[in-house]
Amino acid sequence: MLEINNLNYSYDAKLKVLDNVTFKIEKGKIYCLLGINGAGKTTLFNCITGFLNSNLELDEKLINEKILYIQDEMNLYRNLSGREFIKLIFSLKEKSLDEENFKILVQDLKMEEKIGDTISTYSLGTKQKLVLIIGFLLKYEYIFMDEPFGAIDFISAEYIINILQKYRDDNNGIVISTHLIDIAQEIADEILFINNGKIYQVRNNFIDSKQLKEWIRKRL
């Protein structure tokens, strides 16, 4: 379990983006973090993953070895192919690549025709798939994805959702920030809602996305 306790973050003295944020991420669940633009979703992820300095105390080894953070914009080595990039990552980490599992993941994410192409030709969705393959192969226990579905087609979204659900079922924790309530209601085991620096954590017991929208509207 990943516990976030009393997290605070301000960009200046007047703007407190995160206000004593406390919640838990359990393995074996998909969490969707909902919030309007500017509510602090990306700031929260950046604090948890160490991209921003905050008062949060998490073990550095946990952050580096057990948490994968997939941002909405990723700067990867554009001149390498997807396959070359994966081999480079494993070389830098001094780990051996499980070729059999690699092939399975490439097939599951429909990357057979793209894995040998240079990353410069990749769409955002293809880059996300590539980083997910790396994360699964390195056996990260928690995956944070910042707005993964906003700029990809529904077919790519479906492939990503399917493999994330499989990864959850292998007892890993997944947190996805999104403004797409329909997707959140469909895939989340639990829903996090951020507003005015506070986090609300609720089980996904909503009958449909309309009911979830009404619940959120009352808290804005």
Image (tube, rainbow, N blue to C red):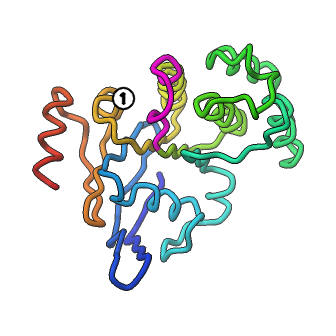
Q: For this view, does 17 lie left or right of residue 134?
A: left
Q: In the rendered structure, does residue 167 fall within the stretch colored magenta?
A: no
**Element at label 1:** helix
Q: In this view of the protein, which residue sits in the foreground, 91 or 155?
A: 155
Q: The disc labelled 1 sits on which kind of residue?
A: Ile
Numbered label tally: 1
Residue at image position (74%, 20%) is: 114
Q: Which residue is mark 1?
A: 187
Q: In the rendered structure, does residue 149 fall within the stretch colored magenta?
A: yes
**What range of the chain is rendered magenta?**
147-157
> Which residue is the extreme one toward the bottom?
13
Residue at image position (42%, 50%) is: 25
Q: For this view, does 94 lie left or right of residue 12?
A: right
Residue at image position (25%, 41%) is: 203
Packing grade of label 1 (10 A; few <14, some 14-19, many >=20) is some
Q: Residue 98: horizontal and vertical position, in percent? A: 81, 27
Q: For this view, does 93 lie left or right of residue 182?
A: right
Residue 40: quarter of image: bottom left
